[in-house]
Image (cartoon, coloured by chain):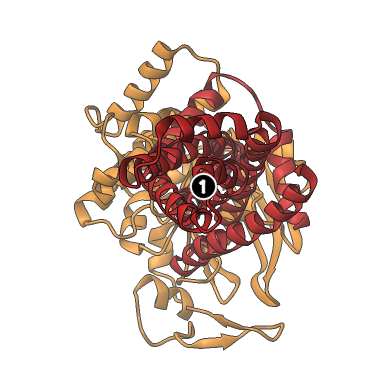
Amino acid sequence: MGHCGFFLFRMLAGIRPGPALLMSVLQQTYLVGARSLVIIMICGFFVGMVLALQAINALQQFGASEQVSLLVGKSLFRELGPVLTALLFAGRAGTSVAAEIGLMKATSQIDAMQLMAIDPVQRIALPRFLAGFLSLPLLTAMFNAFAILGAVVFAIGVWGMDAGIFWSKLQTGILFGKDFMGGFWKSVVFGGLVSLIAVYFGYYAKPTGEGVGTATTRTVVLSSVMVLIFDFFMTSFLV
Amino acid sequence: MKREYGDSVSWQRENSLHDPIICINNLVFHRDGNVVLDDVSMEIRRGSIVAIMGPSGVGKTTILRLITGQLQPADGSIEVNGELVSAMSHRDLYKFRKGVGVLLQNGALFTDLTVFENVATPLREHTKLSEQDITDRVMEKLDSVGLSGTQELMPHSLSGGMARRVALARAVIMNPEIVLFDEPMTGLDPIAMSTIGRLIRETNDQLGLTSVIVTHNVAQMKKLVDHCYILASAKLIAEGSPQLLTKSSDPSVDQFMNGRVEGPISFKYQQNQGGGAAQSS
């Protein structure tokens, strides 16, 4: 944990803002963020559908099925959006970053950089970390949007709920500060957490095929566990 | 006197008048309790091409890593241009490495960058040259290794020999004083080996470099280098011109230079001092 913290300090302390870093971050944002969009959108859509289905089934028993959009919205913005996006991001982008850096190590590219007097932490790890940090809140927003769309399709399209009730309950029930911003801060923290774990395990992977495999496995396992642990503590502070 | 690739060694006599640029003094290096290098001394003269040879796993690449400051010796010293490498701070080490080009075993090209960007990387990182100047210099170096026209290719579409030539262009793009080659010919076909050999000789002489080559390819080294050091069982067992070493009566040198199975250099695992197992050949 301490070593990982030192690694984060090493990345941030050596930042040299400039066009080269900006280009590198943009390129990595495309690779880790934009390329994760399809999986995020598909998963978001079906999570929204299933949430609406479960909510309608549960609320019907109390005669409160018109509250479905409120229940779906609160669950999504506060918990499911940031947490599920972070878990998907760890599986899709975190593993890819860890494997890419590990492979660079196994093929002596990191060595070559050090020998060219280029700091690989700044050149390789930092842009990927910043890209992940920026991408996750944006991906969470996309996940939430597609989940709401999924809920709309099921609740209004399939179940036949009145659209006016659905949207008015959602608009009045979701609070900007507690619900929306609470989820936003979680996604910011999870973005930093997953990206840090991915670049750290990739950078310190053993330079062998087995080492790269271990780094990717550790990335997805530790990221998932840490996201859930941090989620509990952040929820207890934010609520 | 200009020396061509494949010429014999009269050039070396002239070269021996040059001052030493790398001095390795009584070097000792341990890894996991094993003695990897024991009391190794070398003097590499400016402008020469020197080979460090020996069986696989004997510690040849370790010497390169010690010269570049990636590893620290347990005892002894390495001086480059009179400066003690082991005493350099992190900042000084990075400054020192800007004057040293390194070609790693597999070329180690950056797989996410084109050939052009690979060669341009050191210039972009360490100079403030304009885009036009960077383009001119990169194209000149690519041309000198016979690869103009490949600038837009990705490393995965290059053959082994081409990748090694791109890595050579990248290693000399900053006009370093010293270039270190780690097994530059391993895995190449005979034509590619000779091409790389000729390029090393031409680049060394045209740019006034000092080249240190780690290898176990005896046949190529006979054509290329001015001076050889042979390591076996953690010790420096011989040095001299390749022609001289080929005729050596020392059983270890004779075994290595002529590729004999029987001899004092063991093919089996040996237990080194310190308790751990080490492969001696």
- Give above or below for A148 relative to A84: above
Could you say which chain is coloured orange in the image?
Answer: B
Look at 70% across and 66% down and name the residue there.
Answer: B28
Could you say which chain is coloured red in the image?
Answer: A
The image shows residue B56 at horizontal and vertical percentages of 45, 71
How packed mark 1 is, by other alpha carbons closer than 10 Å (few <14, some 14-19, many 20 or more), is: many
The residue lying furthest to the front in this view is A63
**Kind of residue at disc 1:** Thr
- Give above or below for B112 relative to B51: above
Look at 45% across and 39% down and name the residue there.
Answer: A148
The image shows residue B153 at horizontal and vertical percentages of 26, 35
Residue A77 in view = yes
Left or right of B46 in this view: B192: left
Look at 54% across and 24% down and name the residue there.
Answer: A22
Q: Which residue is mark 1?
A: A85
The image shows residue B211 at horizontal and vertical percentages of 48, 44
Q: Quadrant of residue B262?
A: bottom left
Q: Quadrant of the N terminus of chain B?
A: top left
